[in-house]
Image (cartoon, helix red, strand yellow):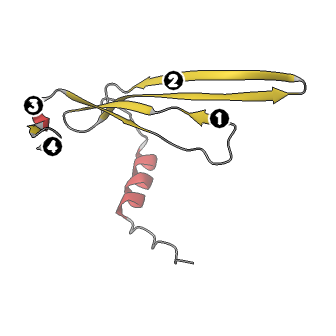
């Protein structure tokens, strides 16, 4: 259950998808990102996201203003099938069975 203002609540499983938005900062960049917007299905899997990038680029005496919006839709997750040669499959299984490396020591 998700609670929100005005004394209400929303059963998340009752909705077929959820929308979200967040802002990012690109340090030392000539571009200003707009909000990143997205949608997730009822299981929490991201199915769509969109971002906007604003800025200007200079080449010599030419200044160009940029305003770009990109939308990505994610579909058919988990449906890709691959036939691997036995040798490649054995290598992947060996790596999957190996213990993960220890994290680097803190500096």
Q: Secondary structure at mark 4?
A: strand
Residue indicated by mark 3:
14
Circle 3 Cα neighbour tier, 10 Å, few/some/many (<14 / 14–19 / ≥20) = few
Residue 2 spot, x, y in % from top left: 15, 43
Residue pointed to by mark 2: 70
Category of crowding for the residue at label 4, using alpha-carbon neighbours closer than 10 angstroms: few (below 14), some (14–19), many (at least 20): few
Circle 2 SS class: strand
Residue 4 quadrant: top left
Identity of the residue drawn at 60% across and 44% down = 26
- Judging by the rendered image, the residue that carries numbered circle 4 is 2
What separation in Å lies between label 1 and label 4 (alpha carbons)? 35 Å
Q: Looking at the picture, how far across and down is residue 44, in whole percent? A: 24, 39
Q: Callout 3: helix, strand or loop?
A: helix
How far separated are the C-alphas under marks 4 and 2?
30 Å
Who comes first in sequence, dot 3 or dot 4?
4
Disc 4, disc 2: CB below 8 Å? no
The residue labelled by disc 1 is 31
Front residue of this view, candidates 73 and 12? 12
Instruction: Between label 1 and label 3, give the one nearer the viewer.
Output: 1
Quadrant of the image containing the C terminus: bottom right
Q: Is residue 85 left or right of residue 4?
A: right
Query: Marks 1 and 3, how far apart in space?
Result: 39 Å
Query: Comparing marks 4 and 2, which lies closer to the viewer?
Result: 4
Q: CA distance from mark 2 to mark 1?
A: 15 Å
């Amino acid at each position: 259950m998700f609670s929100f203002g005005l004394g209400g609540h929303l059963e998340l499983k009752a909705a077929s998808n959820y929308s979200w938005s967040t802002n990012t900062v690109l340090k030392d960049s000539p571009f200003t990102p707009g909000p990143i917007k997205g949608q997730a299905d009822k299981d929490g899997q991201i199915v769509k996201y969109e971002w906007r990038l604003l800025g200007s680029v200079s080449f010599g005496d030419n200044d160009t203003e940029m305003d770009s919006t990109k939308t990505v839709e994610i579909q058919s997750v988990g449906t890709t099938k691959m036939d691997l040669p036995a040798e490649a499959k054995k290598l992947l299984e060996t790596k999957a069975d190996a213990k993960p490396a220890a994290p680097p020591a803190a500096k």
